[in-house]
Image: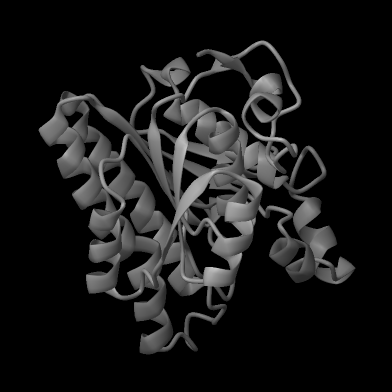
């Protein structure tokens, strides 16, 4: 069944998901596709999971917080997996438990703000284990299944504008997202012949509840806003819409792209 973006929420879910697009014209059809979303309990990941469900996908939501997944499952139809992706063995086991996956969204991530000189080995290793190593582990298992089934697939990694510009006090985070962009390109290169597309989205500050709290101080917020030509931060649904597009058949010729969603921050 083909579903217009404006119709996704009404067709598949009673309440309108936070990420349900409000524009019309494009058709997104994810019916019969099984989607694994990491970091689905909160923020961008939760919005992505809701939107994909509203567009017909069978969603497997993964998070380290069981309470978040429980509340998500009350809002949308989804399977849930509780796992801390910092643990490589647990990450691999949970991914295998998810079964055959057609669409993968590597969204889970952490940020531990520290200056370059103040960055600890523990903080660096934790950041890399979640933001980068878990993507490798989960994607390898999912992609191997895609290759074996011969049906192709699509993977979207949620990166950041921090992969493209230096941000003070975010040495480990910037490094992890820069590496994630390059991993995305290598994945796209090697998996493309198997009809598996791999892309990334690179959001600016996004107004999730956590983002709103982190950027509520005008002294901090106004300086960043001044660098964005559109004069505002991103909304979670704007990231989710881009992810849905990259997962869908509407983007069949897009592979290996890192897509800034930043209101023009990078050109300012």
Would you identify the image quadrant in which residue 175 lies? bottom left
In the displayed structure, would residue 180 be above or below residue 234?
below
Q: Position of residue 87 (x, y in %)?
A: 30, 75
Q: Position of residue 140 (x, y in %)?
A: 20, 50
Quadrant (top left/top right/bottom left/bottom right) for the C terminus: top right
Compare residues 18 and 200 and report the one nearer the observer: 18
Q: Residue at x 71, y 26 (%)?
A: 10
Q: Position of residue 242 (x, y in %)?
A: 56, 33
Asked if residue 267 shows in the view, the reply is no
Q: Residue at x 79, y 52 (%)?
A: 225
Compare residues 3 and 144 and report the one nearer the observer: 3
Left or right: 267 as drawn, with respect to 151: right
Left or right: 33 as drawn, with respect to 213: left
Would you identify the image quadrant in which residue 96 lies? bottom left
In the displayed structure, would residue 174 be above or below residue 256?
below
Q: Residue at x 40, y 63 (%)?
A: 131
Q: Position of residue 115 (x, y in %)?
A: 54, 81
Q: Residue at x 21, y 24 (%)?
A: 151
In the displayed structure, would residue 90 be above or below residue 155?
below
Compare residues 8 and 197 and report the one nearer the observer: 8
Asked if residue 236 shows in the view, the reply is yes
Direction right: furthest residue: 218
How many numbered circles are shown? 0
């Amino acid at each position: 069944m083909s579903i217009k973006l404006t119709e996704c929420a009404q067709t598949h879910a009673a309440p309108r998901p936070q990420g349900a697009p409000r524009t019309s014209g494009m058709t997104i059809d994810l019916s019969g596709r099984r989607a694994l979303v990491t970091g689905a309990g909160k923020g961008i990941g939760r919005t992505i999971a809701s939107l994909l469900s509203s567009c017909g996908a069978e969603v497997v939501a993964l998070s380290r917080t069981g309470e978040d997944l429980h509340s998500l499952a009350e809002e949308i139809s989804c399977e849930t997996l509780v796992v801390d992706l910092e643990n490589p063995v647990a990450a691999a086991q949970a991914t295998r438990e998810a079964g055959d996956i057609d669409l993968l969204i590597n969204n889970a991530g952490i940020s531990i703000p520290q200056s370059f000189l103040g960055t600890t080995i523990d903080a660096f290793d934790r950041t890399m284990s979640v933001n980068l190593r878990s993507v490798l582990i989960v994607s390898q298992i999912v992609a191997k299944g895609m290759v074996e089934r011969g049906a192709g697939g699509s993977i979207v990694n949620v990166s950041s504008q921090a992969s493209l510009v230096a941000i003070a006090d975010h040495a480990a985070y910037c490094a992890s997202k820069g590496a994630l962009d390059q991993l995305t390109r290598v994945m796209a290169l090697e998996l493309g012949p198997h009809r598996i597309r791999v892309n990334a989205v690179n959001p600016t500050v996004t107004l999730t509840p956590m983002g709103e709290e982190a950027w509520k101080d005008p002294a901090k917020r106004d300086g960043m806003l001044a660098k964005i030509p559109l004069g505002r931060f991103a909304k979670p649904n704007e990231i989710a819409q881009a992810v849905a597009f990259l997962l869908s058949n509407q983007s069949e010729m897009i592979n290996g792209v890192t897509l800034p969603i930043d209101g023009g921050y990078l050109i300012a």
